[in-house]
Image (spheres, grey):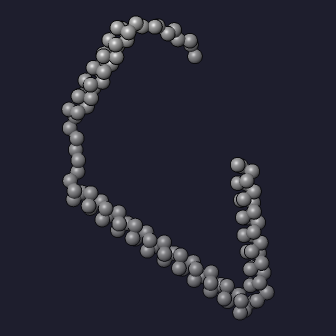
């Protein structure tokens, strides 16, 4: 980056530059105010809100459906394994508990080392 020379202006020149800058800003703002601004009517906004609410409701229903189906499959599998093969049920419970402890520990250690 090049060194820029600083020119010290007397107060009269500084005031003239300030006045010119203010004048240019005011002219620019006046030009911006002359542009037409389109604002949609209230019905358009209301329709957008209704449409968005309907989309959220559909998404909620589909998410809940998937959740309940997956929960049903998991619980069914756990109950069947409990009654049919108790050894596998206990093994799955132990592996799950160990996985949760290890995963949580690793995440906490990473977070602690990151800070």
Residue at horizontal 40 percent and vertical 71 percent from the top: 58
In the image, 104 versus 9, the foreground residue is 9
Decide if residue 112 is on the left or right side of residue 7.
right
Residue 93, horizontal then vertical, whole percent: 74, 80
Where is 52 relative to 95, above or below?
Answer: above
Decide if residue 76 is on the left or right side of residue 34.
right
Where is 89 relative to 108, above or below?
Answer: below
Where is 98 relative to 85, above or below?
Answer: above
Residue at horizontal 71 percent and vertical 49 percent from the top: 114
In the image, 91 versus 20, the foreground residue is 20
Residue 36, horizontal then vertical, whole percent: 20, 38
Residue at the extreme front of the image, as rendered: 11
Decide if residue 39 is on the left or right side of residue 107.
left
Residue at horizontal 27 percent and vertical 20 percent from the top: 23
Decide if residue 39 is on the left or right side of residue 115.
left
Question: In this figure, what is the number of numbered marks?
Answer: 0
Instruction: Point out the image quarter for the N terminus.
Output: top right
Residue 71, horizontal then vertical, whole percent: 58, 80
- Residue 28: quadrant of the picture: top left
Where is 11 relative to 49, above or below?
Answer: above
Residue 96, horizontal then vertical, whole percent: 73, 74
């Amino acid at each position: 980056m090049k060194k820029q020379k600083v020119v010290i202006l007397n107060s009269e020149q500084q005031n003239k530059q300030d006045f010119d800058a203010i004048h240019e800003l005011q002219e620019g703002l006046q030009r911006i105010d002359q542009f037409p601004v389109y604002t949609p009517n209230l019905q358009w906004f209301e329709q957008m809100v209704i449409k968005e609410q309907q989309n959220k409701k559909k998404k909620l229903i589909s998410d809940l459906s998937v959740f309940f189906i997956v929960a049903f499959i998991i619980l069914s599998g756990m109950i069947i394994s409990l009654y049919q093969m108790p050894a596998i049920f206990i093994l799955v419970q132990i592996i799950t508990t160990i996985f949760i402890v290890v995963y949580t520990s690793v995440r906490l250690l990473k977070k602690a080392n990151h800070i």
